[in-house]
Each structure stands twice: as C-alpha cells, then as structure tokens.
Amino acid sequence: MKKIALFITKIIDFLYKPFQKLVPEQLFRYAACGGGNMVLDWVLYFIIYNFVIGHDLVYLHLGSHELCMTPHIASFCIVFPITLLTGFWLNKYVTFTQSSLHGARQLIRYTSIVLLNLAINYFGLKLCVEVWGWYPTPSKMAITIFTVIISFLGQKYFSFRK
C-alpha cells in the first residue's frame, strides 16, 4: 500500500510544479487527494445507483422490523464508507504523512471531522434554502467552501497532527 501511496504522491508532486509559488505543497496534495476522492465518490454513486440498485426502493429486514430506503439514499449509504476509507488513506499516506498519532486514533478523528461536515452540510442547506430562501446550488457551493476549510484545518491540526 505504501508503494501505491508513493506512486500517487509522485504524480501529485509532478502536477504541483507549476503551482509551487502559489500554493503550499500540503494544501495542493490535500486538494488533489480530495478531488480524486470526490470523483471516485461520484463514479461509485453513479454505478451503484444506476446499475446495482437500479432506481428501486431498498428494503432492509431488521429482525421483526423493515426499513425502506429510497435508491439515492441507499446508494449514498453504500458509497459513503468506501470513500470515507479512501479519503482517510489518501490523507494519512499522501497528504499528512508526518503525523505520529496511532492509525486507529487518526481514523476516529478523521471520521469525526467527516461527520461534522455532513452535519454542517445538512443544517447549512436547511438554513440557507428553507430559512433564508437562497437557491440550493449557490447555497451548496457556499457551504462546500466552508466545509473544505473546516476539513483541511481539522485534518491538519486534529486528525493528523504531528
């Protein structure tokens, strides 16, 4: 796995050369890893939603209870843990490689930041769209800028601190 991380790091560092006077290396690596993980999320979601679940309701039998999920939420629930782990792996082995914290502690902290961002997205969209009456897309864009900043700072100074 470390060889794969080294290979990815070399590619990102090669792409970084034209930007080295504009952006710190760690921030560039973070953006590249986050962008790559986001594309993975979109591709997996598309495949799961369109070809695995097939736009149908998903029924989960939990003992004597039955839970019905819409296909878009079921697809999200399948993809989320995958991209959570790939995002963690990329941050641990490509972006924030100097951290001395134990891997399990990093994963718990990383997950807490991700869950915080999910909550910020949810409540931020509710506030912006339903309370303030903003359009959904610009609201999502503004919230994304905010959560990317929160995420970078949280990962750098909390999840993967030195």
Image: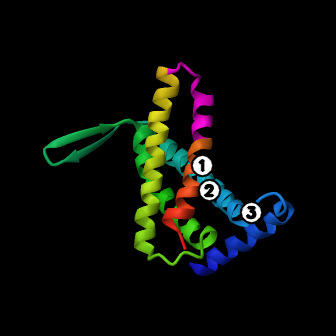
Judging by the rendered image, the residue that carries numbered circle 1 is 148
Residue 49 in picture, x, y percent from top left? 48, 43
For marks 2 and 3 on the same chain, the one whose residue lies earlier in the sequence: 3
Q: Which mark is residue 88?
A: none
Labels 2 and 3 touching (C-beta < 8 A): no
Residue type, mark 2 in image: Gly
Helix, strand or loop for disc 3? loop
Q: Residues within 10 Å of mark 1 (few under 14, many from 20)?
A: some
Q: Nearer the viewer, residue 119 or 87?
A: 119
Mark 2 and mark 3: Cα distance apart in space: 15 Å
Residue 17 drawn above or below residue 68: below
- Which amino acid is tagged 1? Val
| Residue where numbered disc 2 is placed | 34
Where does the image place residue 123, in percent across and percent down from the top left? Answer: 44, 34
* Magenta segment boundaries in residue numbering: 132-144
Residue at 60 percent of width and 70 percent of height = 96
- The answer for how far apart the CA atoms under marks 1 and 3 are is 16 Å
Which one is earlier in the sequence, the residue at label 1 or at label 2?
A: 2
Q: CA distance from mark 1 to mark 2?
A: 9 Å
Identify which residue is drawn at 85% across, 61% down: 21
Residue 32 drawn in magenta? no
